[in-house]
Amino acid sequence: MFQGFRAAAALLSIASWSPMAQAQPIALATAPQLFPADGARGVNPDTHLILTFAEAPKVGTSGMIRVYDAGDGALVDTLDLSIPASPNPTGRVVGADGSTKAPKPPAPAGPENPGYQADKLGGAWFHFFPVIVRGNTATINLHSGVLRYGRRYRVEIDAGVLGSAPQRWSFATKAAPPKAGSRRLTVSADGKGDFSTVQGAVEFVPDNPRAPVTILIRNGSYEEIVYIKGKSNLILRGEDRDRTIVGYANNSAFNRIRPAFSVTESRDIQLSTFTINNYFIGQAEALLMRGERNIVDRMTLNGSGDAFTTGGTIYMVDSKLTGDGDTILGYAALYCLRCEIRSVGPFTWTRTPQGSHGNVFIDSTFIYLDKPLPWSVTPSNPAGQKVNGVFARLPRNGPPGASFANFPFAEMVLIDTRTQGIPPIGWGPVQEQPEFDWAGLRLWEYNTMDLEGRPIDLSARHPAVKILDKEKDARTIADYRRPEFVLGWTPVVK
């Protein structure tokens, strides 16, 4: 698995997320603007607490954030800044030469492994950052579900938390949630919608509503882990693809569940017109999607290694995906129409199970990002390390004879594909024969072109690859153009 940073204008120093990485901050001179405002009413219970200063605050290594029910004085939530966000709060380990590597996966988050920040989302436990600083704004992430409708709360923040004077204010939540059975809900970061977070809206919707429920996400930045499990009949639609951004810094070193956005054990889920970012490197998916009859429509996905991990059946259309190698970790029947994939290293590690179709790309574009894996750039090796941008690789993944040694039914089919920066061999490495039987592989190409639409010379392609012939393979080409042939169902984008 190949790893590297994406160019992300929103990405700040990892230290600004991690309490354990901070020196004691210098006190800020001016009082911050508070959200919710002091005395505010009608606040969503899933709100963040946001403090905006005249200068950039820094997260301290001590101090407490406490939230009380103003009615009965009960303490409803506590965040202790002396507790690290995760066993690996930066998601990396820095070597003596300045290089970084991924630590081993941490122990699972939750009560059985105390000593780290933990929150429960969609039934699963995650490590999380209690305070995130972006520019002059500090966002405090309370534990999910601690605030209720129809209550007034008092917030107390110690001076050590953000290097400011102690903060004290109160606000009141909305009287009641949206009407049960609502078919349309709105998420807005400014608090003017039904919910302030995507996760809050998702958890409000029943697991299996009788009719599709649409969650409209207003323009804004939603820095949160989203975890959808066991849901159906759900549409998440961004107001604007480029201005509705959902993301988080998460990877296999920070959490056992490593994507920024997960859809798992779910069916009939549609994601449309927003951006998902993962701000960490390593095994750090933007999106994991496992289930049946799921749709990715006009989305932008920016991850690192395994940027899009798939399972089940997925229809993906008019979407953009960027990653740092093995950019699609593919276990699904994935039908991609008019999609653009950009990758620092191999575009896919295709792991199709027997009896399923695999990665199928129609009228899509593959662009190799010709740059070193950024984690490999060090003072002693400023050039870093580059790896080839092949379409798919199938190296040995375990000892000979093991069930996971390789994927003998891997399928990846490219039809009318535009490319840039792909090496002449196109694919590989593929585990050598006779130890690994190639008879079940379907690594196929038809009408591969450059970005200007000129045919590519395919004579040097890997021997495991079949170049489809316009006349001899006309039926096969026609079949793979049809999503219902690949997926077993006819996708309808709502």
Image (tube, grey):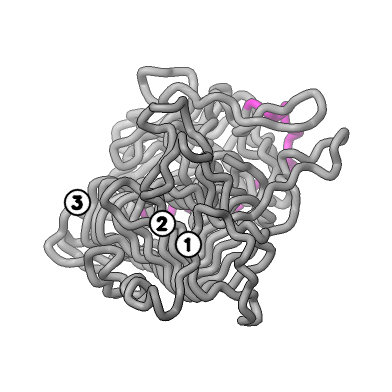
User: At which x and y percent is residue 176?
Assistant: 23, 55
Residue 237 position (above or below residue 205): below
- Tag 3 residue: 207
Residue 401: x and y, percent? 39, 27
Q: Which residue is drawn at 59% across and 48% down?
A: 325
Q: Is residue 243 above or below residue 454?
A: above
Q: Name the residue under label 2.
A: 442
Outermost residue toward the left? 210
**Would you call the spot at circle 2 few (<14 residues within 10 Å), some (14-19), or many (20 or more)?**
some
Residue 492 vs residue 374: left or right? left
Query: Disc number at residue 466?
Result: 1
For image coordinates 60% across by 75% down, the residue present is 449
In the image, which is nearer the foreground, mark 3 or mark 2? 2
SS state under label 2 = strand
Upstream in the sequence, badge 3 or badge 2? 3
Q: Work out whether residue 234 or residue 475 is closer to the camera in this orientation and state it.
A: 475
* The magenta segment: 20-44
